[in-house]
Amino acid sequence: MLFKDKVVIVSGIGPGLGVELARVAAREGAKVAIGSRTVPFLEQSAKELEALGAEVLWRRTDISKNEDCLAFAKAVTDKWGRIDALVNNAARTTPFTSFEEADFEGWKEIANVNLYGSLQMAQACLPAMKKQGKGYIVNVTSMAHRKPLPNQGGYASSKSGLEGATRHMALELGKYGVRVNTARMGWMDGPPVTSYLSHIAQEKGVELKTIQAPIVQNIPLGVMPDDEDCAKAVLFLCTSWSDAVSGAILDINGGEYMPS
């Protein structure tokens, strides 16, 4: 098991990548700590993970609030005495606005979660990782700033900023044995993307498959990667198999975007 006796924190638990990250980690033997702002889904997910045989801690956490991040990390170390890996998956995508019409207070709210919230969560976990002399931090970002979509400037900018911060974290935290990497996600076949594309299809008055088809055509593998497969790729960066990797960006998109 890749995570036997390891403690893995996943922020942003929800339908889609978040819960799949927790499921994969649990199946691989991890003690799993999960956080989000939605208590009913946290409770439901905790029961499911416990049924898989995992030890689980859940806590309502708004990562845009530093006190929540500190309390979450403390609860984990109080329970298990260590933090081996943090996956910063929590994200905010809205408001969707064009640049011309943007209220930048909305963009700041997005950044307070996606950028500063992720950094606060990492900072809260750092003391435990320093004490251990080892740790893994993975910041989940998006292809949205490499292949821009209309009205997603706030979201894309925050994720771009997080990628820049990740490199600085890797540079500064390597001396503590802490590896920091980016998992840059593309289209993922799961509830969040299906909901988003269904909304677009409804607005255009077409079937969902009409919206999905051109996306899949641009993916060399010929399929939209599903949430579970994407979660496995993200969690690779939290294992000893990636001990030689820090400050890197792993593109997880089925080959749709291949940076030079």
Image: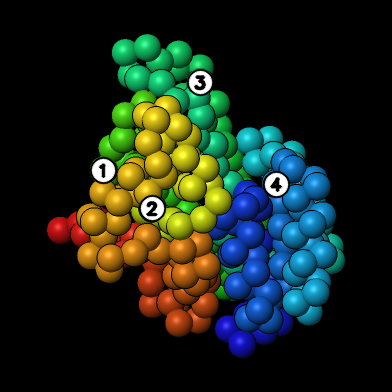
Q: Can the viewer see residue 100? A: yes
Depth check: 176 or 159 in front? 159
Quarter of the rendering containing residue 225? bottom left
Determine whether, in the image, residue 123 is placed left or right of residue 75. Answer: left
Q: Residues within 10 Å of mark 2 (few under 14, many from 20)?
A: many
Task: Give the mark, 3 or 1, whose residue is nearer the N terminus.
Answer: 3
Depth check: 223 or 236 in front? 223
Look at the numbered disc 3 and give the secondary structure of its residue. helix
**Residue 202 image position (x, y, % from top left):** 45, 32
**Residue 95 image position (x, y, % from top left):** 50, 25
Q: Residue at x 47, y 53 (%)?
A: 140
Depth check: 80 or 109 in front? 109
Q: For marks 4 and 2, give the CA distance.
A: 22 Å
Q: Residue at x 61, y 87 (%)?
A: 1
Q: Which mark is residue 187?
A: 2
Q: Which mark is residue 147?
A: 1
Q: Which mark lies nearer to you, 4 or 2?
A: 2
User: Which of the image's four quarters has the C terminus?
Assistant: bottom left
Task: Give the mark, 3 or 4, whose residue is nearer the N terminus.
Answer: 4
Which coloring applies here?
A: rainbow
Residue tagged 4 = 36
Give the amino acid type for the residue marked by disc 3 in the picture.
Answer: Gly
Give the amino acid type for the residue marked by disc 2 in the picture.
Answer: Trp
Look at the numbered disc 1 and give the secondary structure of its residue. loop
Determine whether, in the image, residue 221 is placed left or right of residue 69. Answer: left
